[in-house]
Image (cartoon, rainbow, N blue to C red):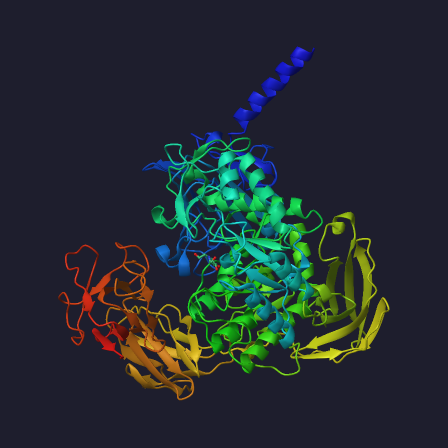
Amino acid sequence: MKKFFCIFIFLTVINFLVLSEEDCLTDHNIAVFYPMDYEEIYTQPSVIFSKKIVNSKPIPSSWKLKPIFSKINGKSIAKIKFSEQIDFYGNGEVVGPLLRNNSTVELWNTDNYCYQKDNGKRLYQSHPWIMGVRNDGTTFGIIADNTWKQQFVISDSEVTISSDGPPFRVLIFESEDPKRMMELLGEWTGTMEMPPLWALGYHQCRYSYYPDTEVMRIAREFRARKIPCDVIWMDIDYMDKFKVFTFDKNTFPDPKKLNNFLHEYNFKSVYMIDPGVKKEEGYFIYDSGSKGNHWVLDSDYNEYNGDVWPGACAFPDFTRDETCKWWANLYTDFMNYGIDGVWNDMNEPAVFDGPDGTMPFENVHRGGKYFPPSSHLRYHNIYGMLMVKASREGILAAKPNKRPFVLSRANFLGGQRYAATWTGDNKSSWDHLKLSIPMSLSLSLSGQPFNGPDIGGFEGNCNPELLAHWMALGTYYPFSRNHASKNSINQEPWVFGKKVEDISRTAINRRYRLLPYIYSLFRDSTQTGMPIMQPVFFADPKDLSLRSEEQAFLLGQSLLVVPRWASNVDLPNGDWDHFFLEEKDDGYQPILFLKSGSIIPVGSIFQHTDEYNTDKITLLINPDNNGLAYGQLYHDDGDGFDYKKNKFSVTEFKAHVIKTDTLKINISNLSGNSQFPRKYRIGYVCDGKINYSEWFSQKEYEIKINNDESFTIDRTLFPSMYIAIDTPKDPNIIPMKYLNDGIWLSDPLAFDDNQAEIFFTDSKSKIYNIWGNQKGLKGKARLLKKTDKGIQFKVTNQNYIISFNENDLSYAVIPAPKFDYISIVGDATYLGWNPAGIPFEQNLLNPNIFSWSGNLTRGSFKFHTCSGNWNEGLWIHPEKNNQSLVENTYTIAKDGEGLDYKWFIDKEGIYEISIDLLSNEINIINKD
Ligand code: MIG
């Protein structure tokens, strides 16, 4: 009997193994596709899923999307084709637009300083995930279930995934709308764990605050200036010679004392830990790592060493279970110094002297209990994820009654289960401020809700205007941390004087006031996988005009955030009402809109979350057309795990308008065992104003209201300007970019016909002003009357950019620049012969002009038109070697085209260089 049973099991297993390699459904809305030559051992076990993929049913014939697998030039390829219009989103941490149509992303975790390497096509994290939204709002998602080096190419009509590894399976998710897709992704790849409340506060960081007295000074400044802050961060300089888990005896002699100090001032401390362990006998971490045989090996099976901050390092092999346990254990003593959170950096892994800044492909990971042994090419992309998983486990074991907080630079799809993330080394520039929004949104749409960029920008010097705008925006990033690099000036909220300090304080006050709402969103995200930061099209997935909006964004579903510098914003229909939480508008804080039908809980200003409570809650209410509104508030201890034993409360708010002039609210406990006695007041939001009621503590309350007259969102709050190009077919409406002071600029435009006619118009809707009635490439436009013509001019076969000044109505049509990037490269610069070089500034009004000024030492240089490799882009050379600096001509060539001429500097000093691509002139001036 027993024997038969065994045979039966054996047969079932065999059967299962065979079947599991056939295409199947794993749930009614998730299909799994296997290539012909699939061999599980090369890609499984998957780190992506938190739930087991089992074969439940064959795929019905009605299933729409199927990958076509192939092998081309040694690459394993999966291609999915589309016959309808699709808008693509996701792919994790990416530079570029929110809309991913026509993009290429390399999945190869890369220490990508300023996003320059490979033009930012690969960054610190990899997410083999893309979702597509159809015109009717239905949404599909695609996962390439493997960790190998791979590439996603998204065109309008197909997604091509090509991997350097063996054939991999593909999962396709289907759902009725994009929000449901987020829930599915969360259900299958896991959601983040509840973070400690303090991690939702404002964070202050710098590379590095040291010695410890500087840390204390920063802490005191925040409290003295009454700028709320929860966390101060310790970057690598706290360590003794960059050795992880040690402290510098001179600059951080007593870390316990320092952390006690921070705790007394109600700050939490986060300390950096990198994966590279200094190769130094006698150093306890290196010794115990060697003893336990924990290091990644080279292709000859010897300990692999590569340089990072401490010099030669060994690297833990996190594919080994024993190694993860060892690593986790290291946190026991470390956390005992009173450390609250951990920051894992450089875990792509970054290796200064390794090929392409990391380990060789052929390095050996030995695996063990979970993973089969394999090469670095297979495990590179999950090195960071496995590291933070081990870190998290160690921190939790060291402090079992606290919620762990880990921040990671590298990660992989599903990594939200272990760590929050920031987007690496950005720049202190307007560009990077703006691109942080689509970047955070793309990460959010890839399962990682807890993310944000360095506020103020990491590399380069910040300036007052930029910091003011970035602080004002940054308060809405799910992870809100100001951070700056070692060689840039300080950028704490107060360093640029009172104006910026006040703007920053107001911004951070807003975050603390919104914490009841934000914390509730975090709770919701842990339950459902819903992103905290959401694209505007989530408000109305069927409204196609919202699909590429990436200046405005949603915080949860009820709050729309529109930065002050936004122009031509596409906003959702419906009666979203805007409001200010302050009496006076400083002109920098984003404009917040409350969705109609929503109630959000807003609290008091706290200097830190130790003070946080929900004793007094203002309910901001914007009833919908039927007079109804709804909202919730989650509350718990803010740390620890009692919430898992029902020690929390979710309070529900329902409002309705009765008798047109009375708003009635009902408050009730929805779930959780805790009771929190509270005072409430109603804040009735009505286009720019909030009418507050008295405080009350009843469960039911009524107030008198004035009827809200408007039924649409107020679009006039933001400037807009479009170019209408009259083509025989249909007028093409193209948004312009707002520069400043009423000046607008178009992107490069191609004209069908050499006889062009355009109009300027300040709105896409029916009520608008139209300007035209002029001839030639330059002039003053006039407001149009019915029969007037537009602006007519002649073009040749090239692209043009058009500027328009709405103050004096002057316009100009000029040829578009041949390049959008120029950098200086050479040993005369501090970067040496690095093909990315130091980027020039592009003139806003005439993008044909690029300029740079800085120090040049004795040596030579040339210019590069992209930030990629030597053989990418073009090079700008002098016409002969050592051409005198006053001759103002140049030539353009590909690398290796023979004329590798360079300019030469024999006198070190400050130089100012400008390149004009229109007149083909170059000016190099020594400023000394
Ligand atoms: O190569 O620890 O992205 O946030 O300040 C630089 C120093 C190493 C890179 C991180 C940055 C951090 C810095 N680190």
Residue 240: % across, % down: 50, 54
Please report the residue visible at 61 percent of the width from the left and 44 percent of the height from the top.
394
The image shows residue 680, relative to residue 29, as above or below, that is below
Residue 895: % across, % down: 21, 56
Image quadrant containing the N terminus: top right
Residue 771 relative to residue 625: left or right:
left
Residue 872: % across, % down: 28, 55
Residue 214 relative to residue 379: left or right:
right
Please report the residue visible at 79 percent of the width from the left and 77 percent of the height from the top.
693
Can you name the residue that lies furthest to the right here?
698
Residue 186 shows in the view: no
Image quadrant containing the C terminus: bottom left
Question: Which image quadrant is residue 380 in?
Answer: top left
Please report the residue visible at 46 percent of the width from the left and 44 percent of the height from the top.
381
Can you name the residue that lies furthest to the left here?
880
Residue 158: % across, % down: 42, 48
Residue 687 shows in the view: yes
